[in-house]
Image (cartoon, rainbow, N blue to C red):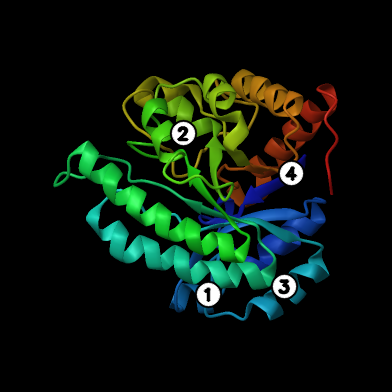
Amino acid sequence: MKIGFHTDAFNSAVFSFEKTLQWAKDHDVHYIECGVIESLSWIHGLGYFPHISLSEDPLKMKEKMAKYGVRFSQLDAAYPLSGKDGVYFGVQYVQKTLPWAKLIGCENIATTDGLNKPEDLSEKEAMELMKMSYSYLVDLAELYDININIEIHGYFTTKPEMLEKMLDFVKSERLGLNLDTGNTYIAGQDPVEFCKKFIKKIKHVHIKDVSESLAMSLRGKDTGIGISHCAVGEGVNAENIRKVLQILRDNGYGGTLSIECEGKGGILLEKSLLWLRNTLKELGIQEEK
């Protein structure tokens, strides 16, 4: 399996994207995931933003990343698709990301639903909107040979019966799952059971632990964590993550394990990376670089 991390680990440290590449190189990590924005912003231009803009040339970016020995495991274009605005904003967001991802050689794009059910829609209406959006996007993804992954993050995706319907919106290998160990746990679900149920759909994985204090205050009351302030292996979700890794191993998963945690300038990310590498060795899983 491949090890990577989401560059939102460095949001609070206001790293530039290139600085995240340097961090990856220094720690022998060859796969990263980041968010994309359309157009530009001052915070991006001044180098305080660890993500990329679709205004940047993808081939030049690919060349720059190659110098650091780093590739994208996934691009995050997860504007919630469960509300009415998802049809107008979320769909075009992913649509514009597809050709950029193709040129830079990224095989996965993350999408998701909103944290809460839209107030102006019933569950059925929201699901119908998402089906229409995903059907359109997956048709495009087929042309680009890119996976459109549904990340477990919100009201619908953290409910296994609804997620099952979402993953069946279209009959295509290009519609997959981004399993998130932290979001499933904080939503009051079992990450291990999620992994077992949807193992054949998993194309990308977020490795995220949960602190005991956060679990006590929010578990079962929220649907997702923007960023975990707990190093992987130091929280109450560590044993679940270990079991998930075993299931992935036993089912031939060879994709990326993308660490998601607050970086604290790199400290928590370093701890997470060490724990994950040691755990993979204990489980007889080879790290692909």
Q: Earlier in the sequence, mark 4 or mark 1?
A: 4
Please tell me how many numbered marks the rendered image carries. 4
Visible residue check, residue 38: yes
Front position in the image: 183 or 273: 183
User: What crowding class fits label 1: few (fewer than 14 Cα within 10 Å), some (14-19), or many (20 or more)?
Assistant: some
Q: CA distance from mark 1 to mark 3?
A: 13 Å
Name the amino acid, label 1. Answer: Leu
* Residue at image mark 3: 62
Q: Which residue is mark 4?
A: 3
- Residue on which the image places disc 1: 54
* Number of the label disc, if any, that sits on residue 183: 2
Mark 2 / mark 4, whichever is N-terminal: 4
Horizontal and vertical percent for residue 129? 28, 51
**Quick check: 62 left or right of 177?**
right
Q: Are marks 2 and 4 in contact (CB under 8 Å)?
A: no
Q: Earlier in the sequence, mark 1 or mark 3?
A: 1
In the image, is residue 36 above or below residue 8?
below
- List x then y, in percent, for residue 184: 47, 29
At label 2, the amino acid type is Asn
Query: Quadrant location of the N terminus?
Result: top right
What is the crowding at mark 3: few (fewer than 14 residues within 10 Å), some, or many (at least 20)? some
Q: Residue at x 52, y 75 (%)?
A: 54
- Element type at mark 2: helix
Residue 30 sits in quarter: bottom right
Residues under numbered marks 3 and 2 in contact, where contact means CB atoms less than 8 Å apart: no
Amino acid type assigned to the residue bearing label 3 in the image? Lys
- Res. 74 image quadrant: bottom right
- Mark 4 or 3, nearer chain start: 4
Residue farthest to the left? 120
Give the SS element for disc 4.
Answer: strand
Labels 2 and 1: the sequence-earlier one:
1
